[in-house]
Amino acid sequence: MKPTGPIPPDYRWRDGELMIGGRTADAWIEAAGDTPLFIYDMAIIRDRIARFRAAFPGVSLHYAVKANPHPPLVRAIAPLIDGIDVASAGEARLALDAGVDARRISFAGPGKRDRELATAIEAGITLNLESAGEAERALAIGRGIGRTPRLALRINPDFELKGSGMKMGGGAKPFGVDADQAAAVISQVAGAGAEYRGLHIFAGSQALDPAALIEAQASALALAARLSEEAGVAPPHVNLGGGFGIPHFAQDAALDVAAVGAALATALAARPAILRDAEFTIELGRWLVGEAGVYLTRIVDRKTSHGETFLVVDGGLHHQLAASGNFGTVVRRNYPISLTKLPQSGNVEDVSVVGCLCTPIDRLGDHVGLPHAEPGDVVVLFLAGAYGASASPQAFLGHPAPHELTIDGTDIL
């Protein structure tokens, strides 16, 4: 058997049944109507927000909506955080529909089309510019529609977040303005009559090493100060990115956010004068919502092939691409996985949990240890709150979309 990741400590079993919020998994499946089913628990998300506030007093918290854009979830999170970061006009509309003030929305991403720039400028959304060319287009569009654009620069930093799952800096990247070109673009934006909103510096994602995050945040502060001094313009706002990881695999340990927060507080207290009046933000997605989600999928067949046991479920990688090992991982490893009902016997068997798609990569659990299971039993995959349904190829082979519920206690939002 191969190891699996740790089940988040927020989940409990009562009389052998998994409890999600205030109900059993079976009760939620009945309420939703069927499996496969994603459930997102706002109680867990509120806990993560409270932990952030305790560790980072005075630092703003933004939600990166790409992690999970389920509309009821976004509506529930919006009043609890200070801003929302989007990566498309569609996500911007989602945030606005959730009641978020346009001035609390920032829009990043390469390849923004002119109509997307115009929509953002018209609404008063901050554009995180990815290039000097995008700056020129945004300024021209603002003049053309008679609106002052709110513009910040996304920086491609000259450092990377060590040990991160996805590196976003430290070399040639399609994202952001290279650090050695940024001062000129800052001067261009600030001198053209735009409302200059500052800097966005994002170096990587899914980091579990507090020392790496502390180093990256210190480097981001130093870079923000250097670029601002070169341009002679103080930034009103500095987004330090995020990158906070969650434990996915065996041997992973939870990030010590208190240590990261303490180090950042020390660094901010000693920040250069040009950053003295800036607002500082951390932008989080996975860390806020990843552990708050579960994916429930029912076993439809149990088969043996060449001595190996396969549990075939009604879900698969078309809903959970990341858990199948096909979303940014080089070596496939098992997410935390279980049955929703655990027998009194502690005996386990070596099984592979596979999806309903006609491809051998549709594997949600590779030689994992589970209690004996039969068709009709339900498998639960944890860490399903981020980069699940919306980050997976749902149209592949034409299977139905999964059900999704955002819950708060025993209520569906």
Image (cartoon, rainbow, N blue to C red):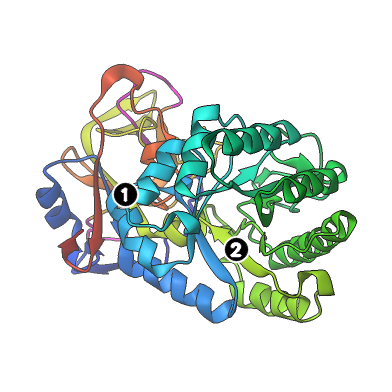
Q: Residues within 10 Å of mark 1 (few under 14, many from 20)?
A: few
Residue 145 horizontal/vertical position (percent): 52, 36
Q: Residue at x 39, y 23 (%)?
A: 306
Q: Secondary structure at mark 1?
A: helix
Q: Residue at x 74, y 64 (%)?
A: 217
Residue 128: image tag: none
Q: Secondary structure at mark 2?
A: strand
Q: Residue at x 63, y 60 (%)?
A: 208
Residue 272 visible within the image: no
Q: Looking at the rendering, which quadrant does residue 23 occupy?
A: bottom left
- Front-lying residue, 288 or 27: 288
Residue 129 visible within the image: yes
Q: Are marks 1 and 2 in contact (CB under 8 Å)?
A: no
The span shown in magenta is 341-361
> Quick check: 147 left or right of 217?
left
- Front-lying residue, 320 or 178: 178
Q: Residue at x 31, y 18 (%)?
A: 397
Residue 333 horizontal/vertical position (percent): 54, 42
The residue that label 1 is drawn on is 97
> Quick check: 308 left or right of 160?
left
- Front-lying residue, 396 or 297: 396
Q: Looking at the rendering, which quadrant does residue 362 occupy?
A: top left
Three-letter amino acid code at the position of disc 1: Asp
Q: In the picture shown, does residue 396 fall above or below 53?
A: above
Question: Is the magenta region chiefly helix, strand or loop?
Answer: loop
Residue 65 horizontal/vertical position (percent): 45, 49
Residue 32 horizontal/vertical position (percent): 14, 47
Q: Looking at the rendering, which quadrant does residue 298 occupy?
A: top left
Residue 282: image tag: 2
Three-letter amino acid code at the position of disc 2: Ile
In the rendered structure, does residue 98 fall within the stretch colored magenta? no
- Front-lying residue, 341 or 65: 65
